């Protein structure tokens, strides 16, 4: 009976061991038992699935031989250090597959005292984290590229960032970015790094890049695929044929404007389909860069653009029937002039807006008021587009409405760009914050003077306009142009500050002379406003010389004085400074409207303005104090505010005092 019980117990143990082996072999993680020398005593089936090694081949093999040669000794040292201290531990290392590739794995291990015939062993479980780490690296690349979209001043600089970031995820020795000209079907190299080829232009016809652009989506081709395309579709074999070729089209809206390509001439295993996601990300950031740079250039040339590219204009009779449209209207909507004369603008109705919205629009303009808003319309071909619309009534001599004029700006791309930037916020929050704020605020600060310019240009064309009126209109146009230029300069300055590309140009600064210059600059404007500008300087020393960046100190004072003028109806403005042992303490004080405590918290944030507290029409993008704060941060200075509503404000800024390193040049 004892023998039977012993046999039954033995069978039970075998069944339990078999069940345990079954569980271990079906684990998603690699599990092994090794002796203290690293020889594998047991490993589960996951080793075969992840590394392609049969279990039998691994048994008796040193587990350290599976690690990357550069990591073996270090991994072994760290394992035993943790085992000696805690009896367990964890490390990360690269494991080599049977084909010679490497997978990144996280290992957790524990000492099993006397587990095999009384000898100590180590159980180690390993999880493949290659894709997790890759996702982290891809996210970092995306974040860095999104930041560079704003900070890079040239595409060459942006391209270098692209190459650098790609090499953090994969080894890239051959990469190029080419832009596509649809009319000529030529591709122009905007950036290229290649071991074998160096070209500037090539035709998209018959090229693999052209094939990619026509396909409209990212793709990977191996050597055999390229040969097949050559034989079956007449693809031209240009230069050295790559073992693996990976490309993605660069899209702006629904239009393909170029492509990014990476290739390897030596190994087909250099890239895989898994790399398509990162090249799509890069292509998207290139598109973002081009759109933003295009918007910046358009802003700088806005005055010329207003004259050379007029907005869409529609004139109707008092019943709303179209009497005139300009060429821009036809270009935008696809309707010929003859097709729309006598029709109602409702032919553009997209069905998006409510009936109540159109009733409100009609009641507004028929009552003699201007209506402004954004409308989603439909082109002749059925394509939807957004317009920023201003509709105004035209009166005859008797004050009766005889026509309506609509000035409309196509804002489809801008709205799309805003949406793209909102999506980019999820990928790179800080970078998107700058882009979104830029687009949301520049639309108002540029469109307002632009509409003013367009309106008064139209009035100038009226033959009944008097000479006095013409002079007044020209003065308004000039003022609106200066306002746009000021907005553009502020945006460029704040962008440079955010990108960290502004440097200090230190030298000797005569603070007394600087304040006198500021006072002289603003004296005419101050006198015009009926105010008084005082200077508070050290009367005991006519020349207080410090070491600093004169241009930026001057700009800080100018921005603060401008703010004082904007928010003061009367009274005085005082500018001054004092020198202590450690700081130059400067200030601008006014007797203006003041700022409440709750609004002082956000006063130095971008696009912040104090509204509703003054009857003055306050202009500006709200960037002046942000620029001041940025300059002071650069100079290791600070700024504070003392203010009460109705009693004025005092801005005090400090910059570290330094003795001048050189004398001022002689006058």
Image (tube, rainbow, N blue to C red):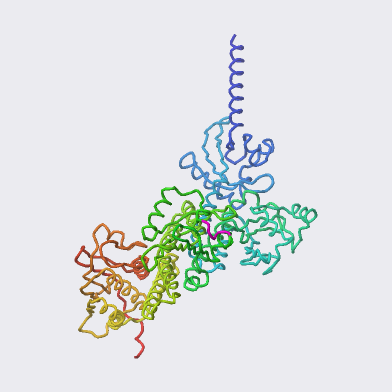
- In the displayed structure, does residue 64 sit left or right of residue 321? right
Q: Is residue 585 above or below residue 27?
A: below
Residue 400: say if magenta: no
Q: Where residue 543 appears, x then y in whole percent?
A: 27, 85
Q: Residue furthest right?
A: 231
Viewport quadrant of the N terminus: top right
Work out whether residue 131 or residue 69 is closer to the camera in this orientation and state it: 131
* Along the viewing direction, whichever of 659 and 446 lies nearer the viewer: 446
Quarter location, residue 206: bottom right
| The one of 622 and 658 positioned closer to us in this rendering | 622
Whole-percent x and y of residue 172? 63, 59
Q: Is residue 25 above or below residue 256?
A: above
- Which image quarter holds the C terminus? bottom left
Q: Going 62% across and 61% down the picture, which residue do you hit?
A: 258
- Using the rendered view, name the quadrant where residue 31 is placed: top right
Magenta span: 339-343
Position of 537 with respect to 359 (left or right) is left
Q: Residue furthest top?
A: 1
């Amino acid at each position: 009976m004892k023998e039977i019980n012993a046999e039954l117990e033995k069978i039970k143990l075998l069944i339990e061991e078999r069940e345990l082996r079954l569980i271990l072999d079906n684990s998603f993680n690699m599990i092994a038992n090794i002796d203290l020398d690293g020889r594998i005593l047991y490993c589960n089936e996951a080793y075969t699935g992840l590394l392609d090694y049969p279990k039998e081949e691994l048994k008796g093999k040193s587990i350290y031989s599976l690690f990357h040669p550069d990591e073996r000794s270090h991994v072994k040292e760290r394992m035993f250090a943790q085992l000696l201290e805690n009896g367990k531990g964890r490390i990360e290392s690269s494991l080599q597959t049977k084909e010679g590739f490497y997978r990144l794995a996280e290992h957790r291990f524990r000492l099993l005292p006397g587990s095999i015939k009384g000898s100590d062993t180590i159980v180690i479980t390993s999880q493949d984290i290659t894709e997790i780490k890759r996702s982290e690296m891809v996210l970092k690349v995306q974040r860095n590229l999104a930041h560079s979209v704003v900070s890079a001043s040239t595409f060459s600089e942006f391209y270098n960032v692209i190459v650098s970031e790609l090499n953090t995820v994969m080894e890239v020795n051959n990469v190029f970015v080419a832009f596509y000209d649809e009319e000529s079907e030529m591709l122009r190299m905007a950036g290229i790094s290649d071991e074998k080829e160096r070209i500037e232009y090539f035709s998209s016809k018959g090229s693999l890049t052209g094939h990619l652009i026509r396909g409209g989506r990212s793709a990977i081709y191996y050597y055999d695929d390229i040969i097949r395309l050559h034989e079956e579709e007449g693809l031209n074999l240009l230069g050295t044929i790559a073992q693996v070729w990976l490309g993605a089209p660069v899209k702006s809206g629904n239009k393909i404007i170029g492509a990014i390509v990476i290739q390897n001439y030596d190994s087909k295993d250099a890239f895989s389909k898994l790399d398509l996601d990162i090249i799509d990300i890069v292509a998207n950031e290139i598109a973002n860069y081009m759109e933003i740079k295009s918007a910046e250039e358009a802003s700088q040339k806005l005055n010329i653009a207003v004259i050379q590219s007029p907005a869409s204009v529609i004139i109707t009779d008092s019943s709303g029937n179209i009497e005139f449209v300009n060429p821009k209207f036809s270009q935008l909507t696809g309707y010929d002039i003859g097709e729309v004369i006598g029709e109602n603008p409702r032919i553009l109705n997209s069905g998006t807006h409510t009936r109540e919205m159109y009733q409100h629009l009609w009641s507004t303009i028929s009552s003699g008021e201007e209506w402004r808003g954004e409308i989603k319309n439909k082109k002749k071909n059925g394509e939807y587009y957004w317009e920023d619309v201003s509709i105004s009534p035209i009166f005859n001599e008797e004050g009766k409405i005889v026509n309506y004029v609509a000035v409309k700006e196509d804002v489809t791309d801008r709205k799309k760009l805003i949406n793209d930037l909102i999506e980019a916020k999820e990928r790179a929050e800080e970078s998107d914050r700058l882009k979104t704020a830029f687009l949301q605020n520049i639309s108002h600060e540029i469109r307002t003077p632009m509409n003013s310019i367009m309106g008064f240009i139209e009035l100038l064309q009226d033959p009944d306009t008097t000479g006095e009126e013409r002079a007044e209109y020209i003065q308004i146009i000039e003022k609106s142009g200066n306002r746009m230029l000021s907005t553009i300069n502020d945006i460029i300055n704040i962008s440079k500050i955010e990108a960290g590309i502004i440097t200090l140009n230190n030298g000797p600064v005569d603070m007394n002379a600087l304040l006198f210059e500021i006072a002289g600059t603003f004296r005419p404007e101050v006198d015009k406003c009926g105010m008084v500008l005082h200077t508070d300087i050290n009367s005991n020393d006519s020349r207080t010389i410090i070491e600093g960046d004169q241009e930026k100190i001057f700009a800080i004072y100018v921005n603060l004085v401008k703010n004082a003028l904007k928010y003061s109806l009367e009274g005085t403005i005082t500018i001054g400074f004092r020198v202590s042992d450690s700081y130059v303490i400067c200030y601008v004080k006014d007797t203006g409207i003041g700022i409440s405590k709750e609004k002082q918290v956000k006063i130095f944030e971008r696009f912040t303005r104090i509204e509703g507290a003054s009857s003055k029409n306050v202009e500006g993008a709200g960037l002046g104090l942000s620029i001041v704060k940025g300059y002071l941060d650069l100079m290791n200075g600070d700024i504070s505010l003392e203010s009460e509503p109705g009693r004025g404000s005092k801005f005090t800024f400090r910059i570290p005092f330094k003795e001048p390193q050189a004398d001022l040049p002689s006058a």
